[in-house]
Amino acid sequence: MHDGLSLLYTEEATESAVGKEALYRLSLDKSIPYFCSDVRESAAFTEAICNLPRTADGVRYRQAILRDLLERSELLSELHAHLEKLSRYSAEYERERQEIYRMRRTGGQGQSFAGAASLVSVSALTLKRVLLLLGAMDDLLGTCSFASEGLRDLQADIRRIARGEDANALLVLCSRFEQYTTVGQLDFRLALNASGRICACDLIPHNAIRAAFAAPKKKKLFSRKQTEAEPAGVILDGQSVELQEEMYIAAVVSLAGQFGEIARFLFDRYKHLTREVLFYKAAVKYCYRLRNSGVATCFPTVAADGAFSCENAYDLLLLLTASPAAVVPYSVEVDAARGTILFGDNSSGKTTFLRTVGVLQMLAQAGLPVPAARLTFSPCSRLLTYYAEAEKAEQGAGRFEQEVREFRAMFDALVPGTLVLLNEPFQSTAYDEGAKGLADILAYFSACGVRWILVSHMHQLQKHVRADAAFLHTTKGYGIEREGCCSDLVGRCLLQL
């Protein structure tokens, strides 16, 4: 998602995989404050959840980085402090640069003359600070041996820039100009066009000038043949003050522009890492919160066939808001090749089941560990949700009309590999009519290569849904069982009452 290095993504994603409404409907937004109270970290965590990696390699990339950071929690705070400094340097540089340009536009020639000196001084000082900061980051990361590809790449990239010969040369040059003034002799190299007019000029070191300012000696009768004279420097007399200032301003502004271009390149290369590291700071807090709950946790196994199965998996919101001993975990398997329907009466745990599956999918695909003894899942290209109780009829529109609009928007957002979670759709219609219409929608989902999970109390669906759908039923005590296998209890959840 960025031109430079990223600690979150191995591939570019142009659209969010998870909409903000999915976080709301699955109550993940309510869970985040229980392990992360920092506003910026929470926002970065939410943003990363909404922009999930789409491939198994992308998920493993995050998992490996998080494992490294969990072993070195102090490193994460120090790295974030360095990146915050980099962001601050960028903001200060842009602010000072804009102020200098404003002064040059509104001031006279003298103001422009002094402004050019200020601009090169600010640009040189900024670049020097950035290079020194990258050196400190190299010292920090250089002591570590990382297992993750992402942190190894970051380590190598910073070392290449901070410790190269070019960096040393730039530091020396920046030191010459970081406190630059208009006092002293200026040496220029000029380029003339075909008309003899100056078309380019820049500052050069004084020791590069070879000048012969003495009057030429008269030729002697038997003197050796004179060789071609070497280029000579010229000292401009006091009558050329305006030309001096023009050349000075052009050369100094050009040099300041080169300093600034390098600094902005480095800012752009690393600035996004500040927000990515905020995600990992929140992720580490989430991991510690799970550990303190006392339940089994695991980094999920990534599959590529659409499979989803878990063993002793907890609903995150219940785990964070209630005593872990009072929450009974799920052990369930969703067939990869077909959709799944969970039937049950009202208040029988259907919504909690759907929420648990959705949250596990998001956390797992974000590269995070989950509250489960084991979880196998497949990354989805997009996660869409429909929650009947979350819908409110628009003014002038009935509930059924609003549901139709919701499904129309969902159809427009479908792409192959989408996972759709449906909670009690078409409750406002007669059950037979609603079941038939819903069966057609589910068939369309399957034809589009979409995986779907539906919870409903409309048993009439069994007459209309194609035979390759899996049917589950809730049981007394909030259990879940497969149809036709009443003794095969595959999952339970919710508070024990």
Image: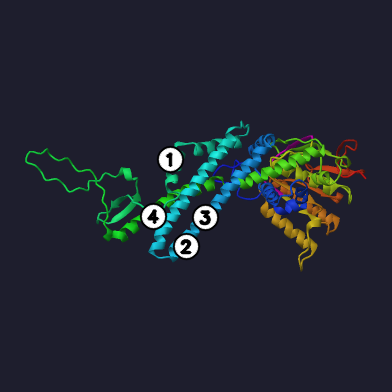
**Amino acid carrying mark 1 in the image:** Ala
Q: Looking at the image, do the residues carrying marks 1 and 2 touch, with CB atoms under 8 Å apart?
A: no
Can residue 413 be seen? yes
Q: Is residue 29 left or right of residue 150?
A: right
Location of mark 1 (residue): 169
Query: Which residue is label 4 attached to?
Result: 182
Question: Would residue 269 appear left or right of 20 to someone viewing this image?
Answer: left
- Label whose residue precedes the other's in the sequence (2 or 4): 2
Question: Tag 1's secondary structure?
Answer: helix
Q: Read off the magenta span.
A: 373-383
- The answer to whether the residue labelled 3 contacts the one labelled 4, judged by CB atoms less than 8 Å apart, is no
SS for dot 2: helix
Q: CA distance from mark 2 to mark 4?
A: 20 Å
**Badge 1 or badge 2: first in the primary sequence:** 2
Q: Which residue is mark 3?
A: 94
* Residue at 80%, 62% in the rendered image: 399
Q: Is residue 200 left or right of residue 16?
A: left
The label on residue 102 is 2
Front disc: 1 or 4: 4
Decide: few, some or many residues near mark 2? Use Cα within 10 Å; few <14, some 14-19, many ≥20.
few
Of mark 3 and mark 4, the one earlier in the sequence is 3
Between 430 and 49, the residue placed more toward the observer is 49
Compare residues 483 and 352 and report the one nearer the observer: 352
Residue shown at 34%/58% (left/top)?
245
How far is the residue under mark 1 from the one under mark 2? 31 Å
| Residue mark closest to the camera, 3 vs 4 | 4
Question: Residue 198 bears which disc, if any?
Answer: none
